[in-house]
Each structure stands twice: as structure tokens, then as C-alpha cells.
Image: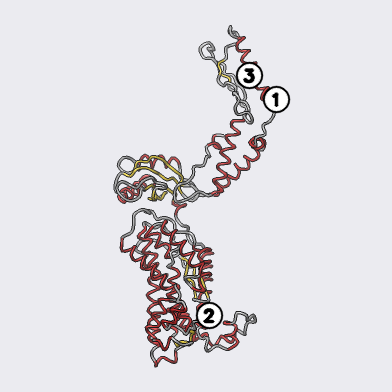
Amino acid sequence: MGTLTSCGFIPLKSEFRSNPVRRAFRETIHYHALKRLRSTCFPTFTHTLPHPSNFPAFRCSATANNNNDNRNDVVEGEAERPPNDSSNATTTTTQERRDDAFKSEKSAPPSPSPRSSLTSLGPTYSNFQVDSFKLMELLGPEKVDPADVKLIKDKLFGYSTFWVTKEEPFGDLGEGILFIGNLRGKREDIFSKLQNLLVEVTGDKYNLFMVEEPDADSPDPRGGPRVSFGLLRKEVSEPGPTTLWQYVIALLLFLLTIGSSVELGIASQINRLPPEVVKYLTDPNAVEAPDMQLLFPFVESALPLAYGVLGVLLFHEVGHFLAAFPKQVKLSIPFFIPNITLGSFGAITQFKSLLPDRSTKVDISLAGPFAGAVLSFSMFTVGLLLSSNPDAAGDLVQVPSMLFQGSLLLGLISRATLGYAAMHAATVAIHPLVIAGWCGLTIQAFNMLPVGCLDGGRAVQGAFGKGALMGFGLTTYTLLGLGVIGGPLSLPWGLYVILCQRTPEKPCLNDVTEVGTWRKTLVAAAIFLVAFTLFPVWDELAEELGIGLVNVL
């Protein structure tokens, strides 16, 4: 019974919230354990002592307390005199009063309260809950050892570092401990000192997090938010290694991405494709697929564009790895997401080690899109210059001019480079590098949207905090849902983010110290360029600027 009644759940107030199912189990077990404790009749016993005149024995008894909660319970611990004592009549009267009370309880009608019916099923229901709770404890993450918690409080915290006032559960399932209290110095220095002491006291067993105090009433007197320290086991807090199946899935996705990139290269030659293939690709009512062997002659000419898209994707991932290597941050293998419109939606790359601070999160998150954007913009610019060169006319492909209305930024750059006459027509002759650069820049812009676990979401979370990410994320979902940004790709990209990338990144070890001003400025500028890239050009503005041939009524 002691184990059951000690299972009371303490609501989590940290960033990591407890599982609601686990919380319901704990609360139900706690209630029924107390119920059964109150309704159990303990056997009456008498402890005979060698000197009864000096040490009177005690008789302990309890009666069911299910229905009549307002009645007087039987007096427990009442002293009884020895049988030869002169007050035997008093003892007999007391015993008779107890018996009468017990009989009246048994003869009392049951209360119509719903708690009475719950009590009748109490033992069976409680046993089921206990078994479920034990199973969840067995399958759940390993908790912090209470002996280690006491040792850490004694050795790490104190007047010179951090004075602990209370403790709360910490972690996704409450498997850790959150120490709340008062800081006794500069937070970065205290945190570094505590990390070193933790290794000395417990070895390589736990990770210590410095996070903002949940539901703090006031900021820290020294400036900034009040901080708390969370403790988790390493095997619980650190990401697991990449499995064999993940390698297999990553390989299959990469092969599919190669195929979608080649398909993009073939589709870019739409003016050369057979009519039945063009009709199947452009007519939404076409249901009969043409002979795919007709596309084989166009595969070789599609390879340069495919190489360009794949090169942008690889540059993006190399940027992440180059930024993570000096910080000793491990990354997973990239899981490329194929897409027939852009060749790919980018890749999902996970952190395989804990990030030391928010500046590291910003640097690694921005490095990938920056590297991919540099290569993409280079190809886009070179392709525009080749498109305006008459000597390269043999390598050009005809594309509908309406495609340049898909991006306000790229459409303006194309209009300034190619001129009004070339752009204000039904089709525009461009070099394949323009398509590769356009697709690459669009991929980088989508991945820099400030939502979830995308590169943009990680950068905003690191630069401005989790609260700002929630605001940016809500705005992004709204714009995608209304089709304001992204054009026809807004719906599939929004679904992809919701299914695969909606969860924000986990906190860093030092999740309190803010990044510098220049990092915040860089993130803000990147978000502005993303919006400028993904906003389409509406018809009236396109006609006025000469981007495409538009008939405005």
C-alpha cells in the first residue's frame, strides 16, 4: 500500500510535458489506493507487555468508511486495562459501544453516491490500473535515481551556486528532475561549474540542462529570465544511433529523388516531347498513360538539370555538416524527400547529439540553406546570362512565361536580365541552369520557413525563443493554407510539414543564453528573403512589370 499511495502525480510545469494517459493512470491509482486504505478492516491485536500497569496495551481497529463519511469513526488507540483491573466495567462498556457502532454500520443502507458503486468495483479496477501502470513504468524511460538526486543536491547546489527551493518532474514522461530555486551568480559561469561538478560526482551518467523557469513570477534580478536546472539520464536525453533500417530507407529515398530529378529534367523539355506525352502531362482529364519508352531519348538531355538539382541538395547537407563539425555536433544521414515539381522537397536531417547552446542551433540551421542558396543563385544567374547570349541558343528550352510569376524576387531578377521583350511573351527561351537554380532557390526558401523542425523553425527558435516560433509557425500555416505563399505547392508542402516536421527541436543544454544581435539580424533577413521568394506575382503587377503575357480583364 505504501507503494501505491506514493504514486501521486505532480503536474509538470517544465518545457517537457507529461503524457496525458500516464497522468490519468497515476491519478486513478492514487485515488483508489487511498480509498482502499480507508475501507480496509485491519485485524484487532493485543500486545501483552510484562508490566501492564505501567505500559497499557493498545487495540487498533478501523471500519469501512465508504458511505457515511460524516459519522464518528471508532476511536483508535484507546488504552485498555488488564482484566483484573477495577475498571473492567468501563472496558466492557467501551467494547459494547464499539460493537454497537460496527453493527449499525453494517445495517446502514448504502448511499446512492456514485462513489459507492465505484468502491464496489474498486479492487478489480485498481488492480487493472496497477498492472497498466507497472507496464508503463517497465516500458518507459529509466528515471533518475533518488539517491543520486540527494547526492547532487548536496554536492552541486548551495549558497555559492544555486539554492534549490523545490523540485518538479522534468522530461517528456517526467523521468527527470527539475530543480527550481535562486541563482547565486552569472548563469553561464554557474552552469559551467555545475556541469563539471556533475561529472565529478556521478561520472558520465547524467545530462544537466539550463532552461527558463516555468511559470516564473518575475525575471531574474540580474537581468534576463529566471533559470532552472533539469537533470536527465544520458540514455534518455540523447538521441539514439542510426539503425540499419534507417540506412535502407535513406538509400531508397535518395534513389527516388534521383528519379524525380530526372523527371524534372524531362518535363523541362516540354516543347520537344511527343504530343501524347505533353497531353498526358498537361491535360488534367487525361487518364490513359502513354508509352513511357517514348521518354527514353530525352533522359540524356535531362541529366544536366537533374545534376543541378542534386548538387544543390548535396551542397545544402554539406553546409550543415561543415557547421556542425567544429561544434562536435553529430548529424544523422539525410532522408531526401522526392517531388516531381521541384525534383525534391529537400531532406530531413536530425541532430544525433545534444546542442550546447542556442547559437550553435542557429549556425547549423542557417549553414545548410545558405550553402544551397549560394549554389542555386549562381546557377540561376549564369543561366540567365547564357539565355541572353545568342551563341547558346542551341541549348535553350522553351518554357511558359507564366512560370516566372511564381516568385516575386526571381521574376523581377529575370525581368531585369532578359528584358521586357523576351519576358512579355507566351514562352521564354532559357538555359536549363535557370530551371535548376530556380528550383534550388525555391527548395531553400521552403526549408527556411519558420515553422516546426525545418531549418527556418530551428533558426527562429534559437534566435528568438520557442514563443516566437509559435507565433511565426501559426502565421506560416495560415499563409500556406490560404495559398498566399508557395502557389500550387503550398498545400503539399503544408501537409509534408504537418506529417514530418511539425515538432519543434528539443532544447539545448544551455537553452537560456541568447544569441548575438548579428545572428538575430541574419535570421530576420533570411525570413524576409524567404517571403519575397515565395510570394507570387499577381496578374495586375505582372502585366505592369512585363513578367509574362497576361490578359487582364
- Pointer 1 residue: 107
Q: Position of residue 439 (x, y in %)?
A: 45, 77
Kindly check if marks 2 and 3 are in contact, taking CB atoms under 8 A apart as contact. Answer: no
Q: Position of residue 310 (x, y in %)?
A: 46, 76
Q: Position of residue 328 (x, y in %)?
A: 37, 61
- Pointer 3 residue: 98
- Pointer 2 residue: 263
2 vs 1, front mark: 1
Give the alpha-carbon distance from disc 1 to disc 3, as whole Å: 14 Å
* Element marked by disc 3: helix
Find residue 540 and report its image quarter.
bottom left
Kindly check if marks 1 and 3 are in contact, taking CB atoms under 8 A apart as contact. Answer: no
Badge 2 amino acid: Glu
Find residue 73 and report its image quarter.
top right
- Determine if residue 452 is in view: no
Badge 1 amino acid: Ser
Residue at 38 percent across and 59 percent down: it is: 462
* Element marked by disc 1: helix
Tell me which numbered mark, 1 or 3, is placed earlier along the sequence.
Answer: 3
1 vs 3, front mark: 1
Kindly check if marks 2 and 1 are in contact, taking CB atoms under 8 A apart as contact. Answer: no
User: Observer-nearest residue: 498 or 550?
Assistant: 550
Quadrant for the N terminus in the image = top right
Mark 3 is surrounded, within 10 Å at the Cα level, by few (under 14), some (14 to 19) or many (20 or more) other residues, namely some
